[in-house]
Amino acid sequence: MNARMLARLFRNSFSFAVSLSVCCGSLAQTNSLSRLREQFQKVSQAAQGRVGIAVELLETHEHVELNAQERFPMQSVYKLPIGMTVLHQVDSGLLALDRMVRVETNDLVPPQVHSPIRDEHPDGTEMSVRALMRAMVLDSDGTASDVLLRLIGGAKPVQDYLRGLGVTNVIVATTEKAMGRDDLVQYRNWATPEGMRTLLESLQAGRGLSTSSRTLLLQLLTETSTGPGRIKGLLPTGTVVAHKTGTSRTVAGLTRATNDAGLVTLPDGRHLAVVVFVSDSTADDVTREEVIAKAARAAWDVWAKTAGTMKRM
């Protein structure tokens, strides 16, 4: 066998080995994603209610869903699209972060809605748009959310902004005050897990916001104090999670919304969009949060493992 034939044989063997490796890798990943959906189904049973999940590795668009086209009440997760719309108006020159805004007594949400602003300033106060943003995102303050929603012109500008991003199935319709007065009103502010995942993808990609506004929002979402036992609950210590939670009251043993939606940074720098909505549940607080934490950890295990395999290859 001459040198030319040996070279051809080597090239063919190498190409076959590479093709086989890619094929086996793709098959293994397909199996992993199928098993992940099965895990989601198993984990969701503990909720004793409806569970919707949408996760996506944004850099490759691999995704796994469970009931991702169903509508779920967002509760305070709806502050994410409100916040993005506020910052879009800042970028457009319609608002300024240092603008001072009077918070009147009739802006204060009722006692059943979480609001440190109301608790600390029962006679009203004056705050900058930046401070209101921080209160809305970091503390999930209902008064801050309603004041900002009023400043941007109500729900319609939010829906216009979402449509401009190509985001459907995320609906902001009314205020925190209205949700506090009637437990059923929260169903008017709804999203599908798939719709919220698309919004997170837009945020990560930097669509619809300036670099400075995106950086500010991601910082606030990363520093948020709510829901440490949800998406973050079972992830390795120090994992960067930019997320927004949402929680309803429990009335007669029924909790209509226990939610979390956010961006998780994997060890190799890639990003997972994770959305878990738990609705109409009769399970206790710990169990509902564990459903979210276990779903997020299952997704982490699939794609963090994939990252390790890619590095070895």
Image: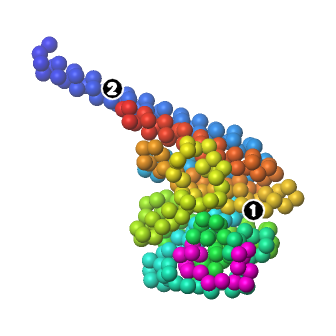
From this viewpoint, which residue is outermost toward the front?
A: 120
Please tell me whether mark 2 sits on a helix, a strand or a loop. helix
209, 238: nearer the viewer = 238
Identified by mark 1, the residue type is: Ser
Does 228 sit left or right of 128 as displayed?
Answer: right
Q: Which residue is mark 1?
A: 248
Q: Which residues are magenta?
A: 118-133
Q: Is residue 13 above or below residue 224?
A: above
Q: Is residue 7 above or below residue 298?
A: above
23, 190: nearer the viewer = 190
Please tell me whether mark 1 sits on a helix, a strand or a loop. loop
103, 281: nearer the viewer = 103
Does 215 sit left or right of 85 as displayed?
Answer: left
The quarter in which the N terminus is drawn is top left
Q: Which mark is residue 69?
A: none
* Distance of label 2 from label 1 (alpha carbons): 54 Å
**Dot 2: within a 10 Å radius of its alpha carbon, few (fewer than 14), some, or many (20 or more) residues?**
few
What residue lies at 33% left-to-right and 26% top-to-bottom? 17
Q: Which residue is mark 2?
A: 17
The location of residue 129, given as percent across then percent down, is: 55, 79
Say which quarter of the image contains residue 42: top right
